Amino acid sequence: MPTDPTAGVPPVAAFRPRKPVVIGILGGIAAGKSAVARMFAAHGLVLLDADEEARLVAAEPDVQRDVAAAFGPRVLTPGGLDRSALAALVFGDARARKQLEAIMHPRIRARILARLAQAKANGDSVLIDAPLLLEGGLIECCDLLVFVDTAPAVRKARARERGWREGELEQRQAAQAPPHEKRARASHCIQNDGDFDETRRQVAALLREWTTRTP
C-alpha cells in the first residue's frame, strides 16, 4: 500500500459538526491507524500524532541525556537517539520498555494535552493517534472511539513491508492491550484490509453521519 493515503486525492468535505469533538483511533499493531488518522485529518480535524510528538521529544537534549544514562551510549547517534536500536532493545525487555516510557511518555502526554487544549479553545475537532491511547489514559479525553479493524494476515504482511524481523509484530503487540479489548471500547469500526479508496469512503461516511447527528 502507498504510505500517504491523501496523495493525489481531490479535496474532501470539511467536517463541521454542531459541537466540536475529540476522536481517538484504536487498533492492533500495523493495522494502518496512522493512515486512517490522516484520512480523518484531510477533512479538517486537528491531528495529534503521538509518534510525531515522540520524535520532537526525542530531539530534546535532556531527554537524550536521560535515555543514554539509562541504556548506554549505544542508543545515541550523531543525529540523536537511534530509534531502531531502542525499539530492538525495549520490545524484547519489559523492564527496559518501562524505563524508556517513564522518560518519554510524561513529556509526550504533556505536549498532546497542550495542543488539545489549544484546539478546543479554537473550537476545532481533534483526532488523537496514539499507540497507547487506551493504556496511557488519553482515551479519557475522547468523545468518540474508532477501531481500525485489519485481518492478522494483512497486519503481518505490512510488518514485513516495514522490514520488521520475524516475531517483532507479536513482541510489539504484547506491549499493548490486545486488539479485541480495544475493539470492545470503540463505538465505531473502520475496515482497513482493502485499498485506500475504500477506507476513505468509510471515513467520509462516518463523518457525514456525525455532521448531521451530533455524536
Image: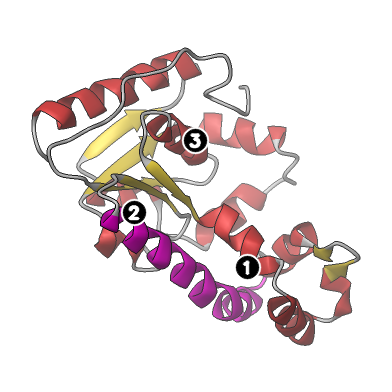
Dot 3 corresponds to which residue? 152
Q: Is residue 61 above or below residue 182?
A: below
Q: Nearer the viewer, mark 3 or mark 1?
A: 1
Q: Front-most of 156 and 129?
A: 129
Position in image of residue 199 (x %, y %)? 40, 21
Query: Magenta segment: does it hold 51?
Result: no
Is residue 117 magenta-colored?
Answer: yes
- CA separation in Å, label 2 and label 1: 20 Å
Compared with 58, 12 (above or below) is: above
Q: Amino acid at mark 2?
A: Ala
In whole angstroms, how far apart are the C-alphas of marks 2 and 3?
35 Å
62 to 44, vertically: above or below = below
Which residue lies at the image location 21% right of the left edge and 45% below the top edge?
A: 20
Q: Residue at x 57, y 78 (%)?
A: 98
Residue under label 1: 57
Q: Which residues are magenta?
A: 93-121
Label 2 belongs to which residue?
Answer: 119
- At label 3, the amino acid type is Pro
Q: Secondary structure at mark 1?
A: helix
| Quadrant location of the N terminus in the rendered image | top right
The quadrant holding residue 200 is: top left
Near mark 3 (Cα within 10 A), the count class, few <14, some 14-19 or many ≥20, is some
* 2 or 1: tag closer to the N-terminus: 1
What amino acid is found at the position of numbered circle 1 in the picture?
Val
Q: x%, y% of residue 198?
A: 40, 15
Disc 2, SS: helix
Dot placed on the residue nearer the N-terminal end, 2 or 3: 2
Task: Give the residue at x 17% y 35%.
Answer: 17
